[in-house]
Amino acid sequence: MMAALKIDNSGNTGRQRKMHPHKFTLWIGIGSILMMFAGLTSAYIVKRNQASWTSFELPKVFWLATGVILVSSLTMFLALRNIRQRQMARYRILLMTTMLLGIAFVLLQTFGFVQLWKNGQTLQSTVSYSFLYIIVGLHALHVVGGVVALVVMFLKIFSTRQRNYSAVPVEVMSTYWHFVDVLWIYLLLFLLMIK
Amino acid sequence: MSSVENLTGHGTAVHIDTEHGHHEEHHHHETFITKYVFSQDHKMIAKQFLITGMIWAIIGGLFSVLFRLQLGYPEETFPWLEDLLGHWAKGGKLDPEFYYALVTMHGTILVFFVLTAGLSGTFSNFLIPLQVGARDMASPFLNMLSYWFFFLSSVIMFSSLFVQTGPASGGWTIYPPLSAIGEASSGSKIGMDLWLVSMAMFIVSALLGGLNYISTILNLRTKGMSMTRLPLTIWAFFFTAVLGVLSFPVLLSGAILLLFDRNLGTSFYLSDLVVNGKILPNEGGSAILFQHLFWFLGHPEVYIILLPAMGMSSEILSTNSRKPIFGYMAMVASLFAIAILAFLVWAHHMFVTGLNPMLGGFFVLLTLLIAVPSAIKVFNWLTTLWRGNIRFTPAMLFAIGFVSLFISGGLTGIFLGNSALDIHLHDTYFVIAHFHIVMGVASFFGMFAGVYHWYPKMYGRYLNNTLGYIHFWITIIGAYLIFWPMHYEGLAGMPRRYYDFSSWESFKMFGGLNQFISFVSIIVFLAQLLFVFNFFHSIWKGRKVTSTNPWGSNTLEWTTPVNPGHGNWPGEIPEVHRGAYDYGKDGKEFIPQDVPVGADESHH
Ligand code: HEM
Ligand SMILES: [Cu+2]
């Protein structure tokens, strides 16, 4: 057995903690990510109100992407439920589905952008398209981050070094995943209503 | 029960059990790498931040000496400059382009790398777990990442000093269009890209750190440590982290857009530009948009720098006056008010950008409102000192110096906060004087106070006192001699960021004064080297600390062993029974927080 240094950060509070610290940290991180998009969307609104603004159309395939990410939220939800009930086989499949759906979402969005680009609506064409590419692109980057975390989590299931049935990492993961989903819905509505 | 096993290579498993009550002390082998390099111990990470910050401070300080040479002695040449800087100082005279690079890097380094990472990074890391009674941060791993992102950011910024076209040179605020267009100046070429990438890494570091600080303070307080029993240091770190977590991402957005404008042909900030006779194709952008995004971070940033200094000074003033801090709740409330207002005043940096005067009026009002919580804090510090049993340790002197500087610099803020006066004062040396006193030097004083005060806890040894006193007196006198006269120069209209004033009839009269200022800055810079010597010398040679609580202080860090290991307390974490400021109560000089309330004790 390896030498272990044990840092016990708990039990010292005496009161019942409501939320796991990692989850709590994630929530603050979510607040922070939101501020970044708040910065971008308010910049967008400022520009939107200036004379040179031109409107745009979202690629149709974004709707399909929206469907995909919504379903992935559902599979993530079910994955969490299954690990809580120790249904490891089903958990594994659901986790993998979520991961694949996440990848599909990013691919569909990329496809949408390729279409736009081919139509001459490039990143540089007008400020409105520049914003579209950057806002949607940054969101996609956050989905990619989530996919990477899912891959790591998936590989860990097969690790022989640590057997872990704890639901906490999955809870953290699912919170983040639902967050990028909701963020996408918000951005979609934003881009549809203010264009 | 849930637990996370974290395998950290080299056979050391750090086990973080976050829900279950028991804990055991295993013997542990730490290799050099896990102990000093990729350490997850908040105390070691704090020292990493501190020492990296000190290296940056020396570099940034040296830059100011170099450009002060130009300002103080515009006619002279210094052949050794050419040896040092090569083509940036042909014939021993700073190249104008390089002068701007030096000013820009000085600002960037001091504001972000020294007074944000070096100050908040050091002391939030060091003190939060120790003072709230936790074994480490909520996530030691993210904490380690936070340092290494800072390190990466440092490496990138440092390497930008050596590229052929020089580092960024558009001022620490990097306003476009200058910063967005490579052809506009040599500092707007690759140096600017490196600046932006480095800042992006820096922001990641600040966010990872901030998340951890907040989460630790809210979740990992020891038994009995209610929020209102927290030392003011912790409150200050808390609000600092909240400000950072909410404002840095906005700067990141701004920086990303700028990167796109620079490299991918977008026009977020650019419109109708002619550079070197060439008409640029960019259209539809607005440079003012960047200023909004920048100052939405920029103003909170100045408080990110200041609040930790406030918190540490409060703690040190109370401990060394042997008196409770005056008005604890008022101190917390005023920190809160400052944190809120910090988000609502950013446009006071933009009064002369053509801001709608009506809107300007609101920003004037909100800006001047900050004077209220600021004044409350000053009043409470002074009343804490009043009739105290003051022990003039070097830490205490620096804390008192902090209060003095905060008063002097805060008063000039009230001038600047009036948009009408600001038309005259904007971009003059008056602004330079204002923010160097209130933010730069004051926060440095808070940081020095913190280092002198907590050094025994960090290294188990004391800093040399005599050197400390010399350091203090030269620095405080020097700082006032440097920055006080700048108010007069600014009132007379002397603009900031000029390379040479001697060719301007109206500013010729300041030639002697500028020379004097430059002379004093060199002396003050040398005095800082004294501190650096003291710091490193004392790590190995300082007088050893023999008691666990050398300052007779109430907070929990002094209940740990002289050299605490990873985990801080060898046994149980102490339980807290009272606030942090029971000094001079019931005839007792001090009562630490872990002492139970006695039956005969008066109300507390
Ligand atoms: C009563 C409180 C304060 C007021 C009313 C105030 C007001 C102002 C105003 C209006 C400006 C803009 C001047 C100009 O560019 O024309 C300014 C600049 C500045 N202030 Fe303050 N201030 C106050 C306190 C502080 C504090 C506490 C800090 C830092 C800890 C600070 C840091 C700065 C900095 C860094 C700048 C200059 C940034 C730059 O242009 O490079 N101020 N202040
Ligand atoms: Cu400000």
Image (cartoon, coloured by chain):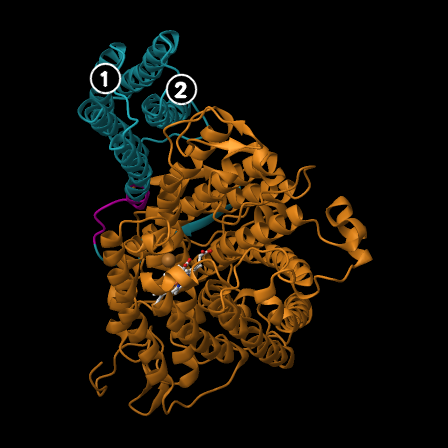
Chain colours: A cyan, B orange
Report if residue B253 is visible in the image.
yes
Q: Chain of mark 2?
A: A
Q: Position of residue B176 (x, y in %)?
A: 46, 39
Q: Look at mark 2 in the image and give the residue it sits on.
A: A123
SS of the residue under disc 1: helix
Q: Disc 1 sits on a residue from what chain?
A: A
Residue B178's label in the rendered image is none
Query: Would you place residue B158 above or below residue B523 in this image?
Result: above
A17 part of magenta stretch: yes
**Residue at 57% in and 56% down:** B53
Residue to which mark 1 is pinned? A66
- Type of residue at label 2? Leu
Task: Please state which amino acid type lies under the numbered disc 1.
Answer: Thr
To the question of a shared chain for discs 2 and 1, the answer is yes
Picture quadrant of ligand 2: bottom left
Find residue A88 and report its horizontal and vertical position in percent: 28, 21
User: How much space separates mark 2 and mark 1, taking CA atoms?
Assistant: 22 Å
Quadrant where the C terminus of chain A lies?
top left
Q: Secondary structure at mark 2?
A: loop
